[in-house]
Image: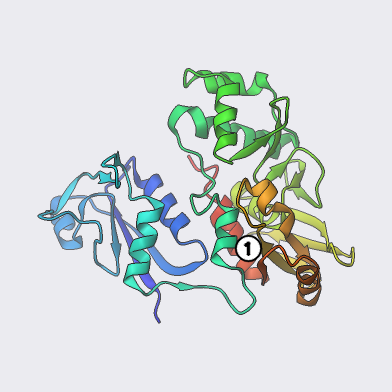
Amino acid sequence: MSRMRITVLLVPECPNAPLALERVTAALVGQAAEVELVEVHDQEQAAARRMTGSPTILLDGVDPFAPAGAVPSVSCRLYRDADGKADGAPSVAALREAFTGAGRVEAEAPEGCCETDALDAVGRAGRGRRASAEGGLRAVHQAVLRHFADTGTAPGSEVLEPVAAQAGRTARQVLAELAAEDFLTLDEAGQIRAVYPFSAVPSRHRVRIDGGAEVWSMCAIDALGIPAMLQADVVISSTDPVNGEPVTVTTQGGAATWKPEDAVVFVGERPGGGPAATACCDALNFFTCAASAQTWSKEHPGIPGRVVAQAQAEQIAARTFGPLLAP
């Protein structure tokens, strides 16, 4: 089957464009599609493109969310969820249903790739890892991420309080909400223990950021997501949990070099759900080869998952973490 063509139509500087693109990306995790962003400048173009408000999302040229009687328009478009609440873009669930209904989106998963459920676990059950802008969540989340990238450590209250105050809240309030939504984890004292992809405590995966700090990452996918998120070159140093041998990934100009050349990633998830830190982070590791990963899988029959080739692992990581620091 051919790939679906997804076209996002919007007016220049549309305030809901980032939200629409974020949700389309989240809905497409592990799937193959061509995504095109098209700016529409006037009513004539809107009619030619079949845009009924900005943003309009077309699937193979068809708007699956068009209300009855919709007419071409360059006005702001709102979408209603099942409860009637207005939003600037369709929900991830609604987009997935539309993609499935079209019946043409294929998984870009070669044999030995991970299950969709495992992919979802990496990105908050398909909801993505980019926090909402409401209530200071995104501002504080991004401040935490940048502090880790610059220093390799979690920021203290003196860094976060001014950011939270801009939303009329305290850092403790915002951090508690981010933790509840699984954007980060806190220890018993309310201090940041991890913010995906970074860990405040040592892990199996060490990442040296060019022009930044050396940091620990939560898992293999998280480590691979750091260069995509920061648009920086990195050197990832990890170890195969079966044989203890090193695995290194070096990125330069967006291209990654893996050593050994046959290295892979195993993506798994513990049954029962819960935060990614406990559900799957210890089940997403680098291995020197597929045979070693399969050995680990046999030794852990209670953790379902699959071996993922290098290109697919990089793709999952980029989709999960690439948008996190975007304005």
Whether 171 is drawn above or below 101: the answer is above
- Residue 78: x percent and y percent? 25, 43
- Residue name at image x 81 percent, y 73 percent: 295
Extreme-right residue of the structure: 244
Q: In the image, is 191 to the left or to the right of 77? A: right
Locate the N terminus and report the quarter of the image it occupies: bottom left
- Spot the residue most to the bottom: 1
Quadrant position of residue 103: bottom left
The answer to which image quadrant residue 241 occupies is: bottom right
What amino acid is found at the position of numbered circle 1 in the picture? Answer: Glu
Q: Few, some or many C-alpha atoms within 10 Å of disc 1 (few <14, some 14-19, many ≥20)?
A: many
- Where, by quadrant of the figure, is residue 216 drawn? top right
Relative to 109, say whether 118 is above or below. above
Indicate whether 26 appears above or below 257. Answer: above
Residue at the location (60% across, 51% down)?
273
Give the secondary structure at mark 1.
Answer: helix
Q: Nearer the viewer, residue 66 or 74?
A: 66
Tell me where residue 153 appears, x and y as whole percent: 75, 34
Q: Where is residue 212 in the image (x, y as percent from the top left)?
A: 73, 41
Q: Which of 26 and 296 is in front in this view?
A: 296
- Color style of the picture: rainbow
Above or below 35: residue 130: above
Name the residue tied to disc 1. 314
